Amino acid sequence: MHDAYEPVPILEKLPLQIDCLAAWEDWLLVGTKPGHLLLYRIKKDAGGNRFEVTLEKSNKNFSKKIQQLYVVSQYKILVSLLENNIHVHDLLTFQQITVVSKAKGATLFACDLQQTSSGEEQLRMCVAVKKKLQLYYWKDREFHELQGDFAAPDIPKSMAWCENSICVGFKRDYYLIRVCVTEKGCKLIQTAFAVN
């Protein structure tokens, strides 16, 4: 059988439990259970499957609970789910830029960087708060609400953007939700799929 990937350990015997990861270019961000944020530089040795891993920066007081991380290197920001709310930090300094106060109680989020017809990049985010979905866009160093909350049939367990749709996984099924932005606002069109 063909293996598409070969797992290679790069961080072993880390004394802290890892809760989430985010990677870009030669960098790896690690969010730990005690709330430490660790930034590693990873360099591959020439001619083998060995990696040189260097701890470049750590922040032991980043948060009490780091649940999810997402790096947007184009905007030099780190979007994170900390203590059930969405926070945005500067990627270089880890200084907080903003908090999405309406997203209090969030359980997960999904971001998407999309190229517009004019060639500009636009960052969108969907946030799950209980049985609701919230849509935001990034402008002027903060997230702005795209439309009011959308009701979901259950509490989302996973989400991923796919072009102009969001695939939302629930306990027993998943929905493909198409996001239609018009002059009158934003509309979601749901298509349900059952998982047997």
Image: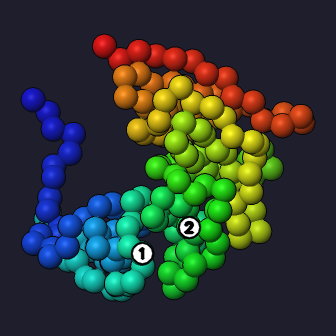
**Residue 133 placement, left or right of 122:** left
**Picture mark count:** 2
Q: In this view, does 68 lie to the left or right of 116?
A: left
Where in the figure is residue 14, as x and y percent of width and height?
Answer: 15, 73
Q: Residue at x 75, y 46 (%)?
A: 146
Where is 52 relative to 170, above or below?
Answer: below
Marks 2 and 1: in contact by CB < 8 Å? yes
Residue holding disc 2:
87
Task: Please report the residue visible at 67 percent of the width from the left and 23 percent of the height from the top.
Answer: 189
* Residue 105, above or below 41: above
Circle 2: residue type: His
Instruction: Please provide percent x and percent y for residue 97.
Output: 63, 76
Residue annotated with mark 1: 63
Tell me how far mark 1 sits from mark 2, CA to CA: 10 Å
Binning the other alpha carbons within 10 Å of mark 1 as few (below 14), some (14 to 19) or many (20 upward) gives some
Asked where in the image residue 121 lies, by quadrant, the reply is bottom right
Q: Residue at x 46, y 36 (%)?
A: 156
Q: For the C terminus, which image quadrant? A: top left
Q: Where is residue 6 in the image (x, y as percent from the top left)?
A: 16, 49
- Identity of the amino acid at label 1? Ser
- Tell me where residue 128 sits by quadrant: top right
